[in-house]
Structure formats: structure tokens, C-alpha cells
Image: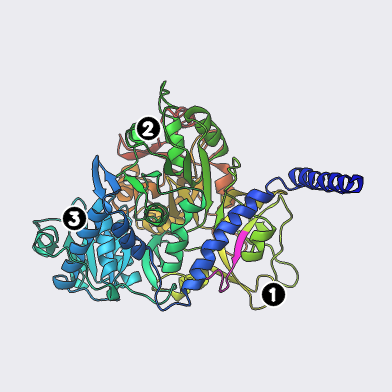
Amino acid sequence: MALSLGWLSALFAGVFSAHVLQTLCFPYFWRDLLFLLKVIRYGVRLELSKLTSSVHTVLDQFVLQAQRIPNKPFVIYEGRVHTYRDVELRSNRLANVFLERVKLRRGDCVALLMNNEPDFLCAWFGLAKVGCSVAFLNTNIKSKSLLHCFNCCGAKTLVVGSDLVDCLDGILSSLLEDNIQVWAMKSQSEHPQVHTLLDKMEASSDQPVPAVLRATSSLKSPTLYIFTSGTTGLPKAAVITHLQSLKAAAGFWAFGATEDDVMYIPLPLYHSAASLIGIGGTIELGATCVLKKKFSASQFWNDCRKHDVTVFQYIGELCRYLCNQPKKAEDKVNKVRMGVGNGLRQDVWREFQSRFGNIKMCEVYGSTEGNLCFMNHVGRIGTVGRSNFFYRLLFKYDLVKYDMVKDEPVKDHYGFCQRVEKGETGLLLSKVSSMSPFFGYAGSKQLTEKKLMRNVFIKGDAYFNTGDLMAEDQEGFICFRDRVGDTFRWKGENVATTEVTETLGQVDFIQEVNAYGVEVQGHEGRAGMAAVIVRPGLVFDGKKLFDHVMKDIPAYARPLFIRLQEVMEMTSTFKQQKFQLVQSGFNPSTISDLLYVLDYQQESYIPLTDSIYQSILSGERKL
């Protein structure tokens, strides 16, 4: 008996010691393991689907949910409830119109230009039901970029929202010359060459089209094209396969959301966050979402209280806008328990939770076209994700040394990249493999290849270049540091400096342009700025430049500041030097060059004075 008690005591002491050791040395072990097992379980399900003759897609899941919970609210928009059955039947009507009247066929690509509204989903699902791939067009892009998008994805049909038809005035003739048919979500059209859909829908059947039209046997079949800005200037059509759609749709579930949650989606559906994670995630769970046409800081919490929202999507800028709203006694009166998004600054994160309640903020890191995703399932403030021994076994990534001045990775004497030490900042690269494929961009093998780095550590290897500088600490938490190269983020959008440079270069008095982004106190991302050399014999014209950027550059990409220079600095590899310009910012008291600021009231670029500079820093002058 005494011997048994001794063994039990020793066993208990051993288990207790192991628990203490694990808690002290590996505090996140169980949370990491349980989260990873959840992710692996979903991944295994996807892998097993490859062995079957048919893949269960996000659309298939929606059709299934419409049969299982037909009367459950799927989308709440501007106070009106649309059930799963409502959207299913309306998308069926559209699918029949697309087949019978638009004459679309399986395999066609159709461009979709619509703001957030339920008919965006109905059109998307209706097109998918007839076997079409869909290209989501950014509603901010201008004429040249819009025409380029059609060339990328090969779309010969455009479906446009009723409120966006007038945006086509400058390019409608070009679309028609390229034999692109235009269909509007309207009953009547003022443009004789713009066809209407709503009147045709009223006469069409709500019975489903044959399921064989949407069936696919490969997870790697393209289903969407989502446009992202890049170093080439013009938008790039990222290929979104069923595999990527299904992975994104599991995001809410992986973070612990359930079918009882109500999601709030204020982000644009043409971006992957709202469409793939937001709508896809709602469908995966069989949950309900509140869809906003546009984000409104003043309406946000009232909406959340009115609809009992429990989960919301964000970008960092969105949370800052909410924190900047006047404080109210009912700030913490809400049922929101979780936010899912990216780009949340540490100071805003802390203020948001302190003011609005203990809401778990789940950061997700990953680009639309990328082959790597980090998820901050622990909720550590200031980090975009978490890695560990198990994660590295499944997903191969590395942080390599990067020379900010030369704007290129640091190589050893053999020509290979060098890994950084823990805690050091490095360029994030993700290995391309069968487990983590990179599907690239539609219409350009050159752009796809440009996003890859080869012979990184050994001859023949290939890595996806994220273009992001990151750091991983001793505990495995990963922090975002900065963007490199020719893109930066502002107002939640990627800004391609090459596109800005090319557009400004069309102004008659400008000889040379170097576009870049600068940090502004109290703002997420970087504000657009351009260093400009004026042509000899001509003078800078702020009014003319204002008119040009208003006409040809999306609002988020417009340079807010202009810096006049005599000479443009170059790197040793004859690329424009951006590093020193970025570092010097836009302070008129420390920069000897003439500086100008975009002024919407005066409709011109006006001299940037010390008083204007201070009003920007204080937040008095809105950007």
C-alpha cells in the first residue's frame, strides 16, 4: 500500500512538474496545438476532396445551407432581411437570364462592377451557377485601369450596378469596340447599348440551372479574379481558385465563430477580405451577416446594437475611425465579442478594447494572391500572427536580410539570401510547393514570375516574395514592420507607386516623378507623396495637377504631398532612390525643397506651411 502511494505521489509530482515547466517555458503549447489540429482537420478534408470526382465548393455549401436553413436570415442590408432562400431563388433567376438572354457559357469570364449590396451576391452566385468565373472590379479604379482589367482576365461581359452605370461614360465606347457586352442591374437604360437585367429577371424562372454547369473536379480551378495593385502600376488579376476560396471561408470558424454569430461586413466586396473571408465564412457556418454599402463610423455601434452583431471585420484604419468618434456612455453596450481583420496598430488596439469592451481582435496576415497565412489566434496585441515548431513543419517560410538603401535582399558570397536572427526584421518569403502553391496572375506569366524569387537558399528553389518586412520574436509571435519596393497601403488599399508615377508624368510641366508613401502621425499606413522635377522653362501649376489627379487617380492613391526637386537620386542599380525620401517625410521646417499639399477646398496643390503641417499632425486637418 505504501509503495502504491509512493508511486502515485511520484507520478503526481512528475505531472505537476511537467505542467509547471510547460506553463513557464511553453505557455501557448496547448492553445497552439488545439488551433493547429483544427486547421489540419480542415486541411485533411480539402485533401480528401481531391480524391473524389467532384469538389464541394463555397457555392455548393451555400446551396446546401439554403436547403438546410431556408428561412434563416443570410444578409441584412439597409434594414431589409434577405434569407438564404431569397438569395438562392434570386440568384437562380439571374442564372437563367445569364444562360438564356446573355448567352453565357460554362468557362466564360464575366466582370462584376458593383458596390456592396445583396445583388452583388446574387450576380456572383448566379454567374458561378452557370459555370462562369467572375472578376471583381474595384469601384475606385479609373478608365485606363478599368480597360486594362478586361485584358487581364479576358472578360467579354460586364455586369454593372445600377448606381455605377454613369461611371462608364468615358470608356463605354472602348468596351463596345472590344466586343464587351454591358448588362446593368436596372429595368430601364438611358444608354441604348447598355442592356438591362432586372426586367428580364421578372420573367425568368427561379428554378435552379443544372448543377453540372458549376461542378468542378479540381480544387485548383479558377473561380474568381480579384484585382490587386502592385509594382507594375496597373492592377493585377490575382487568380483565386476553389482551394483558396475554401481556405478563406474557414477563417471565422478557425477563430471560434459559430452559426449563432452575426457578422458585420463594412469592407468592399471586391476585396478578398469581405468576399472570401466575410461572405464565404458566413456561408461556411450558416450564419447571418449585416452588409454595409460603405463603412460609417457614426453608424457602426448603432448597427451592432440593432442587429446583435457578435463578430465584425475590420482593417486597422476602421478601428482608428471608431476610436476618434466622440465618447458615449453606451460605448460598451454591445454584444460584439470578436473582430477579424488586419493592420491594427498597438495603440489603437489597446484604446479600442479599453473603450468598447474586451473584444478579442483576431489579426490575419496574407495577401490576396499569396500562398501563406498567419493567424493571431492568441490575441497578442501588436502581432499579425503566430508561428511555432508545428506550423513550420507544414508551412515553409523564412525572413531574410534586406538592404533598405539598395532596396534588395542581402546575399552571401555564393549569391544566396541570408536568414535573420530571431527578433530581427527581414523580408518575408514563402516557399512554393504542392502544399503551398502560388497561382499567380491572369494574363501575364511575366508578372507571376516577377513575384517569385528563385535560387534563394539552394539552386532550383522558389519562394513567393510577399514584399513585407516582418519580425518574429523568441516566442514565435510575428509582427509587421513595413512594405518594401513600389507599393504601400493607405486607407486600406494598396497603392502602386508606378501607376501614380506614370499618371503624374502625363502632366505637361512635369519632367520626372518619384512616388512613395510617408508616415503621418495618427494614421494607418502611409500617405501618398511624390518628388517632382519641373521641366525647364515651365512652372509648377497646382491647379492643373489637382485636376489631373482628380480625373485619373483613385482617391486612396492620390499623392497628398508634392516635393519639388532639382535632381532625382538613384540607387547603385539605377533605380529611383525612395528610402531617403521616405525617411525625410513632409516636414517643411526640415526640408529645404518646396512642398505642396492637396487641398480639396481650393481645388489645388497649395504650399505646405508650418501651420498646415501642425494642423495635420494634430488631426485638425483631415487627410
Report the residue marked by disc 2.
Answer: 301
Give the image location of residue 20, x and y in percent. Answer: 78, 43
Give the image location of residue 429, x and y in percent. Answer: 61, 63
Q: For the magenta stretch, what is the residue range?
A: 428-438
For the residue marked with disc 3, what is the amino acid?
Val
Q: Is residue 550 above or below residue 53?
A: above
Q: Nearer the viewer, residue 239 or 132?
A: 132
Picture quadrant of residue 171:
bottom left
Picture quadrant of residue 307:
top left
Q: CA distance from mark 2 to mark 3?
A: 32 Å
Describe the element under mark 3 as helix, strand or loop.
helix
User: Closer to the camera: disc 1 or disc 2?
Assistant: 2
Q: Is 215 left or right of 373, judged from the image as shown?
A: left
Describe the element under mark 2 as helix, strand or loop.
helix
Kindly check if marks 2 and 3 are in contact, taking CB atoms under 8 A apart as contact: no
Estimate how packed mark 3 is, as few (under 14), some (14 to 19) or many (20 or more) residues with alpha carbons within 10 Å.
Answer: many
Q: Nearer the viewer, residue 521 or 400?
A: 400
Q: CA distance from mark 1 to mark 2?
A: 52 Å
Report the residue marked by disc 1.
Answer: 458
Q: Is 307 left or right of 93, judged from the image as shown?
A: right
Determine if the magenta segment contains residue 376: no
Q: Residue at the spot x=25%, y=59% of the render?
A: 88
For the residue marked with disc 1, what is the amino acid?
Ile
Q: Which label is found at residue 248?
A: none
Report the residue marked by disc 3.
Answer: 165
The earlier-in-sequence mark between 1 and 2 is 2
For the residue marked with disc 2, what is the amino acid?
Trp
